[in-house]
Image: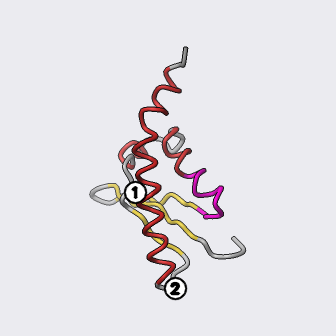
Amino acid sequence: MINAKEAREIANIPKIEEALEKVSEAIENAAGDGKISITWRDYPISGKLYSNNKIPEYEYFKNALEINGYKVDLGVECRQFVDIWLDISWEEGI
């Protein structure tokens, strides 16, 4: 029997896989324009990141990018509203 944590991870993987496809396309477009990084806001679970960046979906997404050589930083700006984004870089030597 799988535990509740495993069930949550399975339930959210399709969303994360879709997000990985979208970010891959954004990276490819940016790289084609000669860029070495992107700021990405089209992230399906950013609302959950308001209180905790150790959620399984974020870890899965971040690890998938880092395994492929990307550097991923979580950006947050708190003003009237909280804005959350990912800075993703593929600059050599980082």
Residue beneath the point at 45% across and 29% down: 8
Q: In the image, which disc is placed on residue 34?
A: 2
Q: What's the residue type where badge 1 is placed?
A: Ile
Relative side of 33 to 47, left or right: right
Residue beneath the point at 52% across and 50% down: 61
Range shown magenta? 62-71
Residue 31 horizontal/vertical position (percent) = 51, 78
Along the viewing direction, whichever of 83 and 22 lies nearer the viewer: 22
Q: Looking at the image, is mark 1 or mark 2 earlier in the sequence?
A: 2
Q: Main secondary structure of the magenta part?
A: helix
Residue 63 horizontal/vertical position (percent) = 60, 50
Q: Which residue is mark 1?
A: 84
Residue beneath the point at 39% across and 54% down: 43
Residue beneath the point at 63% across and 57% down: 66
Find the residue positioned furthest to the left: 80
SS category of the residue bearing label 1: strand
Residue 52 horizontal/vertical position (percent) = 48, 41
SS category of the residue bearing label 2: loop
Quarter of the image for residue 12 reads: top left
Closer to us: mark 1 or mark 2?
2
The answer to if 79 sits in the magenta stretch is no
Q: What's the residue type where badge 2 is placed?
A: Gly
Would you call the spot at circle 1 few (<14 residues within 10 Å), some (14-19), or many (20 or more)? some
Which color scheme did the rendering employ for the protein?
A: secondary structure
Find the residue positioned furthest to the bottom: 34
